[in-house]
Image: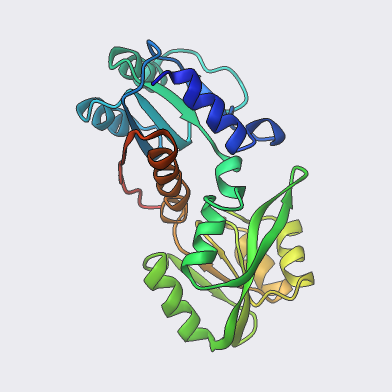
Amino acid sequence: MKLKKITDYLNEYLEIETFSDASTNGLQVENSGKIKKIGLAVDASLEVIKKATAEKCDLLIVHHGLFWGKQNLLTDIHYKRIKALISGDIALYAAHLPLDAHPKIGNNAQIAKEIGLYNIEPFALYNGKNIGMKGKFKKNKPFEEAIANFEKQIGVCNNILNFGPKEISSVGVVSGSATDIDLFKEVMNLGLDILISGEPKYEAYYLAQEIGLNIFYGGHYRTETFGVKALGKVLQKKMDINTVFFDIKCML
């Protein structure tokens, strides 16, 4: 299959052009143009690229690509990653915010579905687009029961900030590292009982404490595996092409 056919589909399906993002979303590195197998991963690390080469992938789709805003010189580790892609004839496609926000296969939509939320809808306005998802449980859950449910579906909790309600009904999900005063205020104004994110920043503690928020941090990496996995299934079905997910765990 031609690379252009796949990237055209991805650009439209993920609405790449509608996002204002620090990431340069879309095709970041070309290959010779033919795709027989697609690899998917959270990060475009050298380890991932080497595994994609060993698995004979022709295209690697990641959440965290290699180009972020400014142009990077082809030196040091950046050179090694680009060289490995070109040597392996592997194209690289990145989808950052578009893969967080997608209403069906996005990280946040997938997490909301996995933890059993209903009435799921977008929230968390960022650069003019809602990138998170919120919803409710059918029945209120005690705080500890809700946390146990999150750990079962997402993974062992990295950190918990417990400054909000002791009964959990409504939940907001913003994967990655969501620590922003406007987001925290939105969570409060919407009356959400808890926010699920990935990795805390230092200032999150006092913001959450003073606003009165519960936050479950499930890990930056773990909360952002959901979207690429779901996208792989879509491509396998839509394009009738082999896909493989590379689970290269990160401590954060």
Residue occupying the point 45% across, 63% down: 218
Which percent across, then down, holds residue 205?
60, 66
The correct choice, above or below, for 221 with respect to 212 in the image is above
Name the residue located 51 percent from the left edge and 73 percent from the top edge.
116
Total count of labels: 0
Is residue 39 in sight in this rendering? yes
Q: Nearer the viewer, residue 125 or 103?
A: 103
Residue 242 percent across, percent down from the top left: 30, 35
Q: Quadrant of residue 43?
A: top left
Establish if 60 lies above or below 251: above
Name, please, the residue furthest toward the left. Answer: 54
The single residue placed furthest to the top in the displayed view is 32
Check the picture and name the quadrant holding the N terminus: top left
Q: Residue at x 50, y 31 (%)?
A: 94
Position of residue 203 measured from the top left corner of the image (x, y, whole percent): 63, 59
80 or 19, which lies in front? 19
